[in-house]
Image (cartoon, helix red, strand yellow):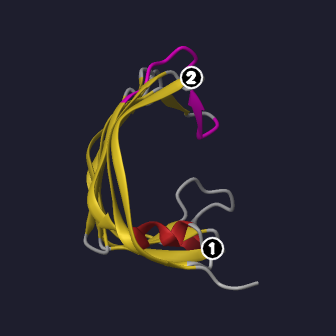
Amino acid sequence: RSSLLKEMSLSDYLLPFHGTVDMDLKITNFDHNPNYKMVFNGSPIYVDVKGKDTYLEKISGELFLDSEGLEARNITLIKQGGTFSIDGKLPLRLRPTEWRIETIKGGEIDMKVQIPETPINVIRDLFPEYEAEVDGSFALDVNLSGSVEKPTMNGTGSVQIASLKVPTV
């Protein structure tokens, strides 16, 4: 059981979060062409978005990383009753000598992102400077493909705005 604290992270961390995560990490072929497998389950998690924490009720899933790329299986995030799911592959790999993520040139994206009808306020934390009050919901069911250089997105999405209040200037 690992407790991941923001205070212990590097100054330019990729995932600025804190909370408790149960994690099983397995590394094989560490010296040559390493393979990483991480199974995780965290609850609750606080993610730093633009200097402000946002709360995730739960995050879980499996990540696999090797020289062929990153594969996400059954990644689930639950926030304010909305369930986000991610499955698929991204052409990303870890440079172990530098501990830096890099894209694989010519690598293909094959990923599915699903968000069933969810309150629109779930994404409000991503835009803390946006002062309008929005009430409604959104949904998304998309497939991402193509390359990092030229990604494509196909699927459906919807936004339903019940009310919108914009502050006066």
* Near-viewer residue (121 or 167): 167
Q: Amino acid at mark 2?
A: Lys
10 Å neighbourhood of mark 2: few (<14), some, or many (≥20)?
Answer: few
Write down the quadrant of residue 62 in the picture: top left
Q: Which residue is mark 1?
A: 130
* Near-viewer residue (103 or 82): 82
In the displayed structure, 40 sits above or below 142; it is below
Q: Which residue is mark 2?
A: 150
Which disc number belongs to residue 1? Answer: none
* Near-viewer residue (2 or 65): 65
SS class of the residue under badge 2?
loop
Q: Which residue is farthest bottom? A: 168
Residue range corresponding to the magenta coloring = 98-110
Q: Position of residue 99 (x, y in %)?
A: 59, 41
10 Å neighbourhood of mark 1: few (<14), some, or many (≥20)?
Answer: few
Q: Which residue is farthest top? A: 106
Q: Quadrant of the N terminus?
A: bottom left
Asked whether the viewer can see residue 152, the reply is yes
Q: Quadrant of the C terminus?
A: bottom right
User: What residue do we see at 44% from left, 19% from top?
Assistant: 108
Q: Nearer the viewer, mark 2 or mark 1?
A: 1
Q: Amino acid at mark 1?
A: Tyr
Position of 101 with respect to 120 (left or right) is right
**Which of the two labelled residues, at mark 2 and mark 1, occupies the earlier sequence position?**
1
In the displayed structure, 72 sits above or below 11; it is above
Kindly indicate whether the residue at mark 1 contacts the one at mark 2 (C-beta within 8 angstroms).
no
Position of 43 with respect to 54 (left or right) is left
Asked whether the viewer can see residue 38, the reply is no
User: What residue do we see at 49% from left, 67% from top?
Assistant: 17
